[in-house]
Image: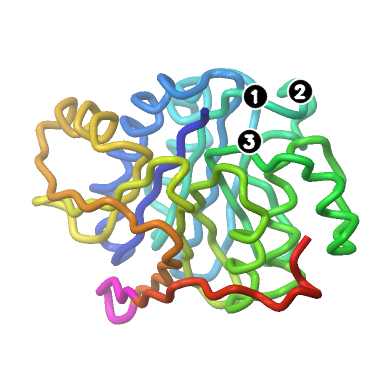
Amino acid sequence: MCGVFGWLGDPGEWRHAHRLMVELAVAHEVRGIDAAGYAVLTSRGELLWRRQPGPARHLFCGDDFAALYSRGVTMAIGHTRLATTGAPAVNGNNHPHRAGDWLLVTNGFIPAHEEKAKKLNLRLRFQCDSEILVQALHRYGEVDGPVVCLSLRGKQSVLVINARSRRMLAWTNGEMPLVAFRVDDIDGLWWASTEEIAQEALATVGLAARFAEARSGVVYRLDVTDGQVVIQTRRAQKIARNRRP
């Protein structure tokens, strides 16, 4: 069990969104304190990210994340880890995982991930099972990649940023929770593992929101155009047998 959360919207709103991201990180510690990490994409296309062992508050309440307050961020993802495979002391096992232009956080577990990676001819650098997802995205791309990831089964809810396309993707296979929400006083779209965790963070800063559960097997493709979040959805189709691990 891990926690995933995020935001995307007009970079002019980031100064307001920054504090809620911190509170979401702290609230998500209930889902894991072994490690934490974040990735942000600025309006200039800068991809900034960090991960480290330990509770999320040590990272998100620290100087590095505070310095992002004025960076004009247009999308952000965060993670709190309860370790399954891969020791948190080895930082490469922690989230976000990166491959090429992709940075990914996930809540879940991919069984037999090493065998599946071999069948897909994916090279894993660390022991964490979640790395297979970002490597699949890097190999198969934005359209087929999420379908390949979902074919790996297990339990997964995913938030991912692609720095080149400046796009966020999100999905769940229904085995792990994922909710989207809109905050009344901060434009943009938010993600959290559960409504209960998000409500705890919102109460801390005195905000209210409207929630919707992510639909199982649906890939959400998210862009920010002229300051507005554009959402496209695509239900993952069965992939060809030669791609199924």
Callouts 1 and 3 close, C-beta under 8 Å = no
Identify residue type, mark 2: Ala
Q: Secondary structure at mark 2?
A: loop
* CA neighbours of label 1 inside 10 A, class few (<14), some (14 to 19), many (20+): some
Furthest residue in direction front, as rendered: 241
Residue at image x 82%, y 35%?
A: 127
Q: CA distance from mark 2 to mark 3?
A: 13 Å
Question: Mark 3 or mark 2, which is nearer the start of the sequence?
Answer: 3
Depth check, front residue: 194 or 59: 194
Callouts 2 and 3 close, C-beta under 8 Å = no
Residue holding disc 1: 83
Question: Mark 3 or mark 1, which is nearer the start of the sequence?
Answer: 3
Identify residue type, mark 1: Ala
Foreground tag (2 vs 3): 2
- Magenta highlight range: 225-231
Q: Is residue 193 left or right of residue 240?
A: left
Q: Is residue 152 left or right of residue 229?
A: right
Q: Report if residue 29 lies within the magenta region.
A: no
Residue holding disc 2: 87
Identify residue type, mark 3: Arg
**Residue 194 pos. (x, y %):** 31, 36
Residue holding disc 3: 51
Q: Secondary structure at mark 3?
A: strand
Q: Is residue 65 left or right of residue 100?
A: left
Numbered tag placed on residue 67 in the rendering: none
**Residue 149 pos. (x, y %):** 64, 60
Q: Secondary structure at mark 1?
A: loop
Q: Quadrant of the C terminus?
A: bottom right
Taken as a whole, is the magenta stretch helix, strand or loop? strand
